[in-house]
Image (cartoon, rainbow, N blue to C red):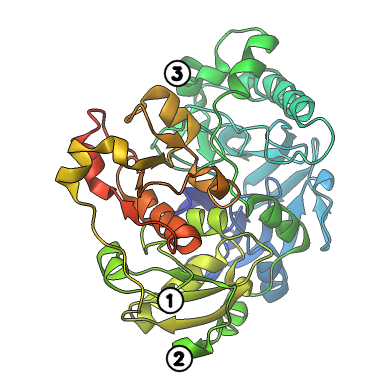
């Protein structure tokens, strides 16, 4: 037996291939959008992919389960509660998938979502590994507020949080301490709030260290789990539904994105331009209607937070190689279909002037300071007493809250988000008032460590 863990660092996503060496068969768990790494694994081991298991309908990334099934003939296993639009082999409590000396057992573990399952691997008759999906993370458990829609949303998330309480205590905590834990996410995901950066653990370690497995009442657990969760990006509900349906093939879909030598006068007005160049080049010259979401670790997250899943956008980059890579990264959240056109951009007619730091230090009252960090960051450490707090994910819908009687200075915790936020504000109101990006200079005002 061999288990291979695959990591998408950008989305802090872990997926898995389980190989039965005696039968040369592979089962995949929670594969990412690009199926090629899994095909390569199977080819390397002269093995056949026989099944794909989805632990739930994912919100933060698009799975390749349907494409893999259509390409290899593998069966798709998931809970019947997933409401799949594709051919599904139900995989719920009591169901098993056996191959070689490996037995995979489904455990219904609602809490993150009603359709959540965990998968217990038994080898030679002993429980060895738990693939916990978004139920149990290392140091945390899955948040319960990504599936609610309509009605009393507070009541819905509290109901799911209560289910998580019992899923952890009545099911997962009963497993032996030496069972190795393999979650679907690590530190950096928005599917939880306190994840470790470790890639695996043991149930014994988690019983000792994970806050969600400590003795506490249901009421205390629900209160803790439902408080101070990260924001929910706009693309999350879109991805849930796309995964229930199954996405089109990765290569075919990304190949349909038009990459062109587009002339700026051919751009359709009213469609955002996502400019991925570094902020120095962006500020020196960019196109009207641009947002500077730089080619960096959190590109997908902020693309899917600032641009809605029903909107089209242009994608601009410094060169063709970068364009192709970012089209692929856009596809990991299902956004390749939203790209109107992609093109290489060197400069543009719009500029953003640098902040006069000395003037700002001496005359902060002459600026409207906009803090675009998350609410939890602001409550823990408000840097400027006079600042207006509007989280970046809410900036477009709350732009009218920013007064236009003074120059605007935008900050986050380290500079990446403020490049996005300042460019967004400048595109929306820059014709009326100067907009400046405090950027990395925020470190001169903030004595606490930065979190980008």
Residue closer to the observer: 401 or 221: 401
Quadrant of residue 196 within the rendered picture = top left
Residue at 44% over, 92% down: 261
Tell me, yes or no, if residue 144 can be seen here. yes
Vertical arrangement, residue 369 with respect to residue 434, above or below = above
User: Would you call the spot at circle 3 few (<14 residues within 10 Å), some (14-19), or many (20 or more)?
Assistant: some
Q: Which residue is mark 3?
A: 209
Q: How many marks?
A: 3
Give the residue pinned by disc 1: 316
Looking at the image, do the residues carrying marks 1 and 3 touch, with CB atoms under 8 Å apart? no
On the image, numbered disc 2 is attached to which residue? 263
Write down the quadrant of residue 368 in the picture: top left
Camera-near label (1 vs 3) is 1
**Quarter in which the C terminus is drawn:** top left
Q: Earlier in the sequence, mark 1 or mark 3?
A: 3
- 223 up-or-down from 238: above or below: above
User: Of helix, strand and loop, which one carries label 2?
Assistant: loop
From the viewer's perspective, is 382 left or right of 25? left
Q: Is residue 9 visible?
A: no
Q: Assess whether mark 3 and mark 2 are in contact (beta carbons under 8 angstroms).
A: no
How far separated are the C-alphas under marks 2 and 3?
A: 57 Å
Q: Position of residue 73 (x, y in %)?
A: 72, 71
Counting from the top left corner in percent of width and height, residue 401 is at: 54, 42
The vertical placement of 384 against 298, above or below, is above
């Amino acid at each position: 037996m061999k288990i291979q863990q695959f990591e998408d660092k950008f989305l802090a996503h872990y997926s898995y291939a389980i190989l039965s060496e005696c039968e040369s068969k592979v089962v995949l768990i929670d594969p990412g959008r690009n199926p090629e790494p899994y095909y390569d694994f199977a080819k390397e081991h002269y093995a056949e992919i026989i099944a794909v298991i989805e632990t739930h309908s994912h919100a933060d990334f698009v799975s390749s389960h349907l494409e893999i099934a259509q390409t290899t003939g593998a069966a798709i296993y998931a809970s019947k509660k997933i409401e799949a639009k594709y051919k599904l082999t139900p995989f719920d409590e009591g169901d098993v998938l056996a191959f070689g000396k490996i037995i995979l057992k489904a455990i219904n573990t609602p809490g993150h979502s009603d359709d959540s399952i965990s998968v217990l691997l038994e080898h030679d008759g002993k429980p060895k590994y738990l693939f916990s999906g978004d139920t149990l993370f290392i140091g945390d458990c899955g948040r319960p507020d990504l599936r609610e829609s309509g009605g009393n949303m507070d009541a819905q998330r509290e109901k799911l949080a209560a289910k998580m309480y019992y899923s952890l205590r009545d099911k997962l905590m009963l497993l032996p301490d030496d069972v190795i834990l393999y979650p679907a996410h690590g530190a950096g995901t928005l599917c939880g709030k306190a994840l470790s950066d470790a890639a695996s653990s043991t149930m014994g370690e988690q019983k000792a260290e994970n806050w969600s497995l400590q003795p506490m009442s249901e009421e205390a657990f629900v209160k803790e789990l439902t408080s101070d969760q990260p924001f929910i990006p706009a693309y999350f509900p879109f991805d849930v539904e796309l995964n229930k349906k199954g996405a089109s093939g990765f290569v075919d879909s990304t190949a349909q994105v038009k990459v062109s030598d587009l002339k700026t006068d051919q751009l359709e007005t009213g469609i955002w331009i996502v400019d991925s160049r570094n902020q120095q080049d962006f500020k020196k010259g960019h196109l009207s209607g641009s947002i500077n979401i730089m080619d960096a670790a959190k590109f997908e997250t902020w693309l899917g937070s600032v641009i809605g899943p029903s909107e089209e956008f242009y994608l601009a980059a410094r060169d063709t190689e970068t364009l192709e890579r970012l089209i692929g990264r856009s596809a990991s959240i299902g956004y390749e279909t939203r790209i109107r056109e992609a093109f290489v951009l060197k400069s543009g007619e719009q500029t953003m002037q640098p902040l006069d730091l000395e003037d700002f230090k001496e005359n902060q009252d002459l600026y409207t300071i906009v803090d675009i960090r998350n609410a939890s960051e602001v409550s823990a450490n408000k840097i400027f007493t006079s600042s207006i707090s509007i989280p970046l994910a809410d900036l477009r819908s709350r732009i009218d809250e920013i007064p236009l009687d003074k120059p605007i200075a935008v900050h986050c915790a380290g500079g990446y988000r403020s490049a996005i936020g300042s460019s967004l504000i400048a595109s929306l109101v820059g014709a009326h008032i100067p907009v400046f990006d405090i950027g990395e200079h925020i470190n001169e005002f903030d004595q606490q460590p930065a979190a980008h």
